[in-house]
Amino acid sequence: MSGISIAIIGAALCAALAGCGSAIGVMAAGKAAAGVASEKPELFGKLLVLQALPGTQGIYGFLTAILIMVRIGVLGGAAVELSISQGWQFFGAAMPMAIAGLVSGICQGKAAVGAIHMTGKQPDASGKGITMTALVETYAILALLASILVLFGIQL
Amino acid sequence: MTEYNVYGKKSYAYALGRISGTSHRVLRAEEFARLREADGETAQKLLTDYGYPAVADGKTVYDAIEAEKNAVSAFVREIAPDEELTQLLFFEEDALNLKILLKSEKLGKEADLDTLCEGGFSKELLRICVKAEEYSMLGETLEAALSGIEKEENPCRISCLVDNAMFSYALFTAQKKNCRPLAELFTVYGECKNRLTALRLTKLGKNAEEFDFAFLPVKKPDEAEIRKSEAEILQETDKALDNVLTDLGYGDGIGVIAQYYFRKKAEAGALRLLFAEKRAEESRGDTV
């Protein structure tokens, strides 16, 4: 397998795993939000924010994948000749975002479900719910930073 | 509402979301305290403010409480994803319906099905079973527990046998379906009921061994538990039930639905008692 193939697999996994985490999280939050909204439709705006929160991991994964593809020249230029070692370096750079994106997306979805139920019971507490759910985001952001720092540290 | 039927499978996340947002919510402790402090008329108004149906002309507050209980029962049936498990929550209502039907049959009268409450089993099915003296349509557990009940003459025994049969059915089905939250709830419920049965027998000066049929098929209270004071027993059983219901609330499945339904049922009972006390107080005041 060539270096560029390994790097592309890393980018693809990053987008796919983080996207799956987000999809699962948004789905769980969506079901809970639909339940609350069918009883209290006036809360739709507050519930939508909570449902959207687990979706960011997918965006971070996609962003990391794009950055990898730009760096290896698959997007917007000629593909760079990569050694196997460099390919694995790109693969490794993608992993923090891929793994943390998958796990934190699911976990943030669960936190969002709890916050949605809380908003259903106490609509005024939605701000607290958003804060609590957003805390899970910290780890996705740290993973994104780690991926970007490693990515731009790779010598071509 | 059918949106929750995603890919042919109902979702607990949706059901629990509906419980969170429902207008048929469980009253908070401070709301209950306010009801307790208020006079009868104010308490009635407060209850309406808390989401109970308004008391219509010619109706009483008890009708409003009953209407709320029926609405909650219909709501639980509508949202619960697993019909077979949901049906188990209504084992007390089934027992009551069956007792009424058996009593009517014994008296040679036709029971009015409209006056029966909504249980897990269809009222018509129970009526057919009682008429035919054949309970196989209710499943093996109930068939075994209820066969020959029509020959029983002692009303106390009939009542206990029916309670026992419906409880056993609920507990065994929950265990068979590997539903830990319900199995745990029913076990604690049965143990608490057994403690209360032992207390009643002690108060009546009866021997517990003579009334073995009155105990549910779970752990019976030991001597030390029986010797405790009435207040202690009542407090401990209340606490045990409250603890198990609170634990169920931390889950994300049928346990939360069971918690909601049992809390609302307990709330209805407590409200009936509260308004009965208020009425008694007011009538005492009038007499003075």
Image: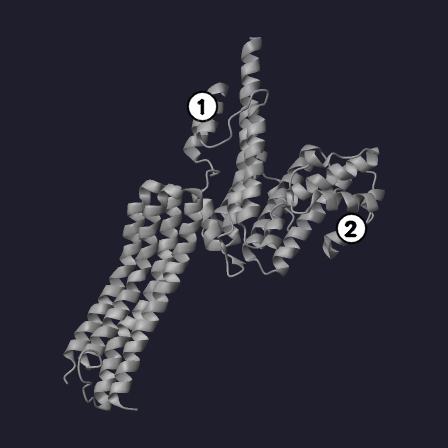
Task: Using the numbered discs, state the Cα–Cα distance from disc 2 to disc 1 in whole angstroms.
Answer: 48 Å
Is residue B22 shown above or below A73?
A: above
* Amino acid found under the numbered disc labelled 2: Tyr
**Badge nearest the viewer, 2 or 1:** 2
In terms of secondary structure, where does tag 2 sit?
loop
- Give the chain of mark 2: B
Residue for point 59% across, 50% down: B86
**Neighbour class for label 2 at 10 Å: few (<14), some, many (≥20)?**
many
- Give the chain of mark 1: B
Is residue B167 shown above or below A102?
A: above
Residue B207 visible, this angle: no
Q: Disc 1 designates what residue?
A: B37
Question: Percent x, y for residue A139?
Answer: 26, 64
Q: Disc 2 designates what residue?
A: B135
Q: Is residue B187 left or right of residue A100?
A: right
Is residue B180 shown above or below B45?
A: below
Q: Is residue B129 left or right of residue A139?
A: right
* Amino acid found under the numbered disc labelled 1: Glu
